[in-house]
Image: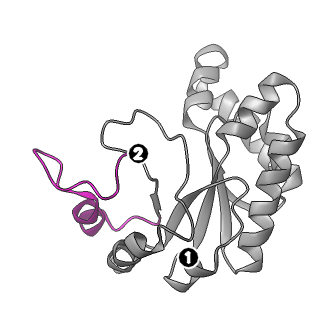
Amino acid sequence: EGNPFAPPRGAYPGLLELVRATHPAQVTLVPDGDAQLTSDHGFALPGDIVKLQPLVAALRAHAGRVSVFVDAGATDFTALAGIGVARIEIYTGPYAEACVAGDCSDALDACVRTAQAAHATGLMVNAGHDLDQRNLLLLRTAIPNLAEVSIGHALIGEALYAGLAPTVRAYLALLRD
C-alpha cells in the first residue's frame, strides 16, 4: 500500500521504477495518501480517470495487468476499461464491518452491484480489505467469479492460533467450494 503517485524519495524509487525493476503479474492502484496506514476508500470514478490514465499507460508496459481499487457501490467502469485497466478490486472494509455488526446485506448488495457492473464492462473482479473466514464465503457465493481476494492481516492473525498451513487450507476451501 502507499500513494501510487508519490515521487521517489530516499531509498524509495517510486512506484513506476519498482514495477520496471520487478515486472509484477499485477499492480493494484490504491488512492492512499503518503501518511496513510491502511486503505479506507477507492478511487473516485470517473473523476480520477484523468490522473490515472498516464500512470496506467506507463505501468502496463512493465506489469502483466493493472487493477484499480474502487468503493463498493461504484458502477461506472467504462473509462477504466478504456484506459487499459484489466481488473478492479472492490474495497470490502464496509462489508466486513457490517458483517461484524450483524447485518451485511446492504453492504453485500453494493459489492455485488459493483462486480456485476465491472463484469459487464469486461473487467475482472478482485476484492479485499478486512476479509476473513467469517465473511469470505458469503462474499464468494454472492460474487462467484471473483478472480482474486486480498486477505493478509486476518490470515496471519488466524495462523498465529491455528498454524499457517491449516489456515491457508481453510481459506482455500472457502474459495474453492
Q: What numbered label is drawn on residue 109?
A: none
Task: Write the start and end of the magenta stretch as one range.
Answer: 1-26
| Residue under the image location 57 percent in, 75 percent down | 86
* Residue 148 falls left or right of residue 18: right
Q: Nearer the viewer, residue 142 or 94?
A: 94
- Way the structure is coloured: one colour
The label nearer to you, 2 versus 1, is: 1
Q: Position of residue 40 (x, y in %)?
A: 54, 40
Give neighbour class at mark 2: few <14, some 14-19, many 20+ (Cα, 10 Å): some
Q: Which residue is mark 1?
A: 80
Q: Position of residue 168 (x, y in %)?
A: 66, 36
Q: Earlier in the sequence, mark 2 or mark 1?
A: 2
Q: Is residue 106 visible?
A: yes
* Residue 49 falls left or right of residue 163: left
Q: Position of residue 70 (x, y in %)?
A: 60, 57
Say how many tags the image has: 2
Compared with 156, 131 (above or below) is below
Q: Examine the structure image and report whether residue 14 is included in the region drawn in magenta.
A: yes
Q: Position of residue 83 (x, y in %)?
A: 49, 82
Q: Is residue 177 visible?
A: no
Three-letter amino acid code of the residue under disc 1: Leu
| Residue under the image location 55 percent in, 36 percent down | 152
Q: Which residue is mark 2?
A: 1
* Local secondary structure at mark 2: loop
| Residue under the image location 59 percent in, 21 percent down | 157
* Residue 15 falls left or right of residue 13: right
Give neighbour class at mark 1: few <14, some 14-19, many 20+ (Cα, 10 Å): many
